[in-house]
């Protein structure tokens, strides 16, 4: 793999789940290993970029000297970290499986488990991608992910427009080798003109290389 194409560029990547506290010992969160985001951060860094990796709670690490990991827990913390760092970056790749809802009230003490029912009121979290889409400048790149179960391409294209993304990476849920926890993924990249490019089932590392190659070709067209 060639290196150096992204020398001097700064990228923001977010990865992993967010945990939304219910009480001191329980949370709401999505399944997410963080692997896709960590691979993307590593490929960006290997090509010369300085990477800020805002990561939810995961069991993986990176030792790359050009990656600064900023650990966060909740969607609120992830939103604040991303809003702080995006303005100084050339682009952001948003792989995190952000929880869409958070408990309206977080209990200070452990909720007793002797009730036959428990009702929690949830409120929507901030949409980080949409927030970054609002402050994006003409030369900045913004890339999101989508995981759809029906009308995948149309739904992903709608999200791309709503969040002001340059392209969106659609994850397949139909392929048993793709998705949560596994080391492989199968993606389709959709751009602003609704042009869809389908990639084969590959290792997450190879998928990260395809995504970063697409980032590089978009960066070139933005700067010319
Ligand atoms: O709307 P949906 O969750 O399907 O969109 C997925 C994309 O939006 C991903 O890039 C994800 O990281 C991002 N997202 C976000 N903040 C949320 C929910 C999703 O940044 N609260």
Image: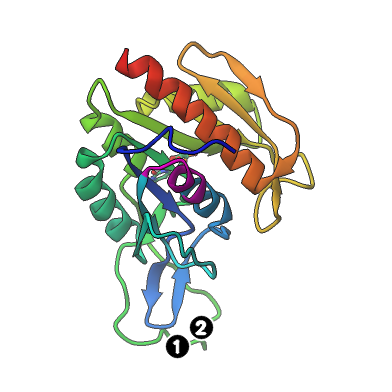
- The secondary element bearing badge 1 is classed as loop
Instruction: Please provide percent x and percent y for residue 105.
Output: 29, 69
Residue bearing the label numbered 1: 112
Quadrant in which the C terminus is drawn: top left
Front in this rendered view, residue 216 or 27: 216
Instruction: Please provide percent x and percent y for residue 13.
Output: 40, 47
Which image quadrant for residue 151? top right
- The secondary element bearing badge 2 is classed as loop
Instruction: Name the residue: 42% across, 66% down.
Output: 19
Q: Which quarter is ligand 1 in?
A: top left
SS majority, magenta: helix
Q: Is residue 62 visible from the viewing direction of this image?
A: yes
Region rendered in magenta: 42-49
Which image quadrant for residue 116? bottom right
Instruction: Name the residue: 42% across, 62% down.
Output: 56
Residue bearing the label numbered 2: 115
User: Disc 1 and disc 2: Cα gap in Å?
Assistant: 7 Å
Quadrant in which the N terminus is drawn: top right
Instruction: Please provide percent x and percent y for residue 114.
Output: 52, 88
């Amino acid at each position: 793999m060639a290196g150096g194409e992204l020398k001097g560029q700064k990228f923001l990547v977010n990865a992993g789940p967010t945990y939304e506290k219910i009480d001191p010992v329980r949370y709401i969160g999505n399944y997410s290993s963080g692997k896709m985001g960590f691979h993307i951060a590593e490929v960006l860094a290997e090509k010369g970029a300085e990477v800020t990796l805002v990561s939810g709670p995961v069991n993986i690490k990176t030792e790359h000297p050009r990656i600064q990991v900023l650990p966060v827990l909740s969607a609120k913390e992830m939103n604040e970290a991303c809003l702080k760092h995006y303005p100084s970056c050339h682009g952001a790749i948003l792989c995190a499986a952000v929880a869409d809802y958070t408990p309206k009230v977080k209990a200070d003490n452990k909720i007793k488990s002797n009730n036959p029912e428990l009702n929690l009121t949830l409120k929507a979290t901030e949409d980080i991608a949409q927030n970054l889409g609002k402050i994006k400048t003409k030369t900045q790149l913004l890339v999101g992910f989508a995981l759809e179960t029906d009308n995948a391409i149309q739904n992903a294209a709608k999200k791309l427009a709503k969040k002001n993304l340059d392209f969106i990476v659609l994850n397949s849920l139909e392929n048993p080798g793709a998705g949560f926890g596994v080391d492989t993924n199968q993606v389709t990249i959709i751009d602003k003109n609704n042009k869809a490019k389908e990639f084969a089932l590959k290792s997450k590392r190879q998928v990260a290389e395809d995504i970063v190659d697409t980032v590089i070709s978009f960066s070139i067209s933005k700067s010319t």
